[in-house]
Image (cartoon, rainbow, N blue to C red):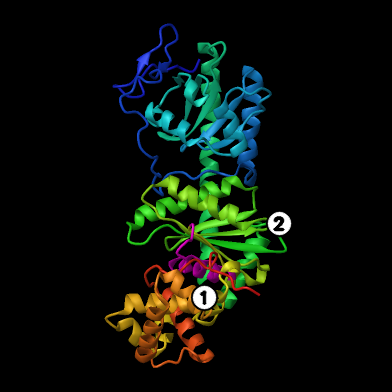
Amino acid sequence: MWPISSVPVCDRMSRSREGDGIAAVPEPGALDGAAAGPVRSPGRGEGAAMAIDHWPAGHELQTLVDAAASELGRPIGIDDARFRPVAYSAHHEGYDAVRTECILGRESPLAAVRWIKSLGLPAAVAPQRVPANPDLGMAARIGVPLRYSDLTVGFLWLIDEPEPLSDDEVAAAAAVADRAAAVMHRMRLLERQHRRREQLLLQRLAAGNEATSARAAEELLGAGHLESAARYRVLALHAGHGLQPELVRAGVVDALERLRRRLPARRVVAAEVADVGLAVLACPAGEDPRRHAAALARMAREADTELRPVVGVSAAVAADELRRACRQAHDAAAAVAFDAESDGIVCWDELGAYATILEARSSVDPLAAVPAGLRRLLDSPDAPALVATLETYLELAGDAAAAAAALSLHRSSLYGRLRRIEEIAGADLRSGDDRLMLHLGLRLWRLAGAPQSRQPSRRARPRRAV
């Protein structure tokens, strides 16, 4: 019989349950300050979650789980080392809310993960009884660590209600865990190799020359990394400027992994490339790309509260235009700098005139293209007020009354500022060419990383009567 250890999870928190020898963890509320604060992302060295249908080992794990569930008469679930579901048997009843959410959402609820971590389960080396947590809708469980070469590669879970499992049943589950650990280890090795290849292909797709990028796209489709589709979109996740690279990288990797798990296999290829998250999505007709972009941004924030995620979304393109879509997604993410009301999601399709400028300046420094007259205005002592005035006036199509109202100025004060702008910039605001030059110059200045615009939202601007 497999020995059931009573070694505690950690000395401060564990106690033995009388009569069965399985290490137990405290009841809810028994920990001082447990589960406080956000869950931080593990480092890159930790195991990634695996798409079970990609590998023969995955089918072997599923067969093992189904056979064990039949033998024990209880549903079984297997998570990876970060408590993300990898395999589970059939569940004919709603055992608890956490198990249901794990299966339907393809990831464990964060509150449940906090609870399990607070009880010391990541350090466990023997089966552990986890008490019920009614606040989470979580039934009592037994967690059996999957150990391979002294490393925990996952956990096997059994519901411990309504009748607790006997020592013999837990021993049988532990024997299954031994076999599952070896399978999980093989899956992890294969998955790492697979992910490294995808990362290299995405790097070549985004940063290679046209020939290299085309070959990368062909391999992504031909080797089965990504399903064939009429249209694709690229998401570019920028998780924050000025933060520690390790923090950004960990948040990006975690968010991309969770996005993978939300979608069917081969619907998405995702990898971190130079601290930016790239995801190529096969797009069904009519699907709103904002939904996935918003989920990716939310997952990055959940990975670490210090991150400030921005997601750029490309236009829908054919497979032979994926290189262009990568650039569009990156440029769209950069465009958040001039959208004062952005929610952190910027779609190429919604950029309007900025998309035209971005396409034109793909190989040009935007500041180098700012007109000399506008640069003089930007360098002037009164630049903050004058630039805000000019930008508002141009955004409102030269409507002086609307601009004065938006800026809370008397109209005569507005005209005074406009004359001053003309003098400094050497421009005539009655000229369509000069207005276009200044307007494009301002947008290029924004693209180069200028402060947030004070202009009124383009969505809320006054409309002229027809």
Residue at 61 percent across and 57 percent down: it is: 289
Residue 329 inside the magenta-drawn segment: yes
Residue 445 can be seen, yes or no: no
The stretch of residues the image draws in magenta is 325-343
Asked whether residue 184 appears in the rendered view, the answer is yes
Q: 152 or 1, which is in the foreground?
A: 152
Residue sitting at x 42%, y 85%: 370
Q: Position of residue 196 (x, y in %)?
A: 51, 56
Q: Residues within 10 Å of mark 1 (few under 14, many from 20)?
A: many
Which quadrant holds the C terminus? bottom right
Q: Position of residue 281 (x, y in %)?
A: 62, 58
Direction from residue 425 to residue 354 in the image, left or right:
right
> Which amino acid lies under the numbered mark 1 shown in the image of this protein?
Leu
Q: Main secondary structure of the magenta part?
A: helix
Measure the C-alpha gap from mark 2 to mark 1. 37 Å
> Can you tell which mark lies on residue 396?
1
Q: Pick out the residue farthest to the left.
A: 381
Q: Which residue is mark 2?
A: 284
88 lies above or below 229: above
